[in-house]
Amino acid sequence: MSHASSIPPSLNILLLEDIHASADSVLESIPGARIRRLRHAPDAGELKDLLAEADVLGLRSRTQLDAAALAAAPRLRAVGAYCTGTNNIDLKAAAQRGVAVFNGPFSNTRSVAELVIGHAIALLRRVPERQAAARRGQWLKDARRSNEIRGKTLGIVGYGKIGTQTGLLAEAMGMRVVFHDVEAKLPLGNAVAAPSLEALLGEADIVTLHVPQTPQTRKLIDAQRLAQMKEDAVLINLARGQAVDIDALHEALAAGRLRGAAVDVFPVEPASAGQAFESPLRALDNVILTPHVAGSTVEAQRNLGIEVSEKLRDFLRLGAVRGSVNLPEVGAGPVRGAARIVHLHRDEPGVISQLNGLLAAAGLNVTQLHLETGRGVGVAVIDVSQVPAAATLSAVRAIGATLGAFLADFASAPGVPQAA
């Protein structure tokens, strides 16, 4: 694929889905940056038209960036997912086109964890069904099946960033915390690892899911697993829509075996506010239904705007690959030379040898080289003694394994000394 030889005079940055304005000040620090904003998630046809001139793309969870869309983006160099999940992006296709993808796994952690605790309180107090009854004119003033969360057991399925934060908040509220994860994790606070998922389901008063979307987590909570939960327990899913069998959950709730549930993500979600939301759970009073907003707070969106934009900036200006979901990490430090070449390639033998040969033939001395490989891709960040000529860069891009190559604009990057 073809890239400009350096940061172009106009670096076209397309931001979709009303990304927070905090992104602008970071992205504007890239020389030549021109930011175009759209509030909506474009459909496939509109997206292809928009990507024709885009160098950088920012999106959230509703925009579908598949292989066909990427093929329509000849200039695209980097994608910022201003959210945690990247299920809507074809990461492999992006890597094969030399497009780095970055997300924001930390910024909305607190927002999601707080909502879990809020839902836990509301469900154990039967707030959803009492509110629904009150709207119909019924007055359900009683203490039946209404409890404090203090002293109850919270079962966390998936003990990552959000799971650990949720556990700490739950302990501060006086809860006991058990967790299950497919990998060994260090417990925080007084949390205890359950010997199995079945054991966790059998002792937790509240089960909350914080798992990624993988084949293994598809319908992780099905009819069999719901039957393993404690009588009168509640289920909270703010993670992935595919993780719960919605029909089986509806049956367990309608039968009264579970006290309630809170669901923020669904197997099929409306593409826009204009489409109707359909789910069998809509008919039940003992369910909290929210439209994929667990991480959607002003604070989280502001933090995401900064976190993801800084990763994009550092990649374009320094060649640093920090927190990419489809490329190996490269901790490129200060530049030692007159220019820095960033070269993305298929992980094949001989690529660096060819690069060195081309640079030597052009009279360029390599003053520093960072190389990382993984996921079938190699990223080489090469400092050279002189600014390479256009013909040299063209030869670099012509190496058979090349996915993309560009000059980093390090000279005006914050905290980076300019070359002598």
Image (spheres, grey):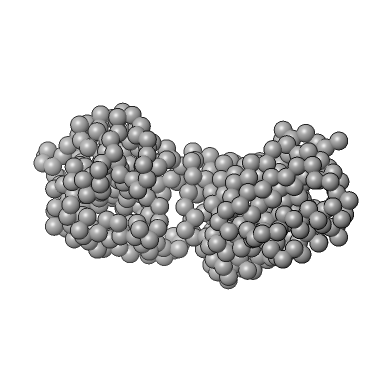
Q: Position of residue 398 (x, y in %)?
A: 77, 64
- Which residue is depicted at the point 27% across and 56% down? 221
Image: 302 above or below 253: above
Say which residue appears at 40% left-offset and 42% top-offset.
160
The residue lying at 86 percent from left, 60 percent from top is 391
Task: Inspect this view and state whether residue 119 appears.
Answer: no
Q: Residue 390: horizontal and vertical position, in percent?
A: 85, 58
Residue found 43% across the figure and 45% down from its top: 295
Q: Quadrant of the N terminus?
A: bottom right
Whole-percent x, y for residue 389 in the image = 87, 55
Is residue 1 visible in the rendered structure shown here? Answer: yes
In this view, the residue in front, 309 or 159, is: 159
Residue 181 vertical placement versus 55 (above, below):
above
Res. 169 image quadrant? top left
Quarter occupied by the C terminus: top right
Tell me how many marks there are: 0
- Judging depth in this view, the residue of 166 and 397 nearest the camera is 397
The answer to which of 273 and 400 lies nearer the viewer is: 400
